[in-house]
Image (spheres, rainbow, N blue to C red):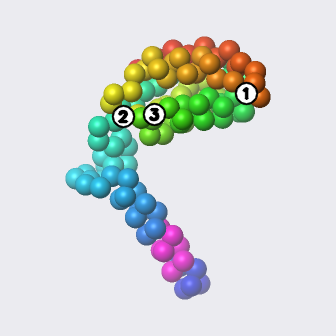
Amino acid sequence: MKPLFACVFIVASLAACERQREAPAPTEAVQTASTPANTTTLKIRIAGMVCGGCAEAAQQALERIDGVRSAEVSFEEGMATVICEAGVSADKLVTVLHHVEMNGEKMQFQASVVE
Ligand SMILES: [Cu+2]
């Protein structure tokens, strides 16, 4: 029982360390857990996804954009949540989504900024 406990502790410490590196000077634990400083969170509705693979393709396209820190696309909700640097324009994200291709085929997603 004891070795397992130690193992879990080490893994937890490493995870905390990883987070520390991303946000070098956290003043509030709560703030680092949600949105890092100098970033904005954009929500974009995506229509035209027919399976989880579509969501995956949309997510990868968003993650490739300069200034995008993280992107999460939910097929069930038809929604993308993107955390990006303040200078990234929402129009850019929408344009990229409109041009997502999978295996050389255009996905025909309809994207619009929610907030
Ligand atoms: Cu699909």
Q: Which residue is mark 1?
A: 102
Label 1 beta carbon less than 8 Å to ligand 1:
yes
Q: Name the foreground residue: 25 vs 101.
A: 101
Occupied quadrant, residue 51 = top right
Decide if residue 101 is on the left or right side of residue 111: right
* In the foreground, 97 or 114: 97
Q: Which mark is residue 66?
A: 3
Which is in the foreground here, disc 3 or disc 2?
3
Residue 45's place in the image compared with 55, above or below, is: above
Q: Residue furthest bottom?
A: 2
Of callouts 3 and 2, which one flags the residue occurring earlier in the amino acid sequence? 3
Label 2, residues with CA under 10 Å away: few <14, some 14-19, many ≥20: some
Report the amino acid beneath label 1: Met
Q: Are marks 2 and 1 in contact (CB under 8 Å)?
A: no
Q: Residue at x 60, y 16 (%)?
A: 98
Q: Is residue 51 inside the magenta stretch?
A: no
Instruction: Give the class, few, some or many, for how many residues have Cα within 10 Å of label 1's Cα (few <14, many ≥20).
Output: few
- The one nearer the camera, 17 or 61, is 61
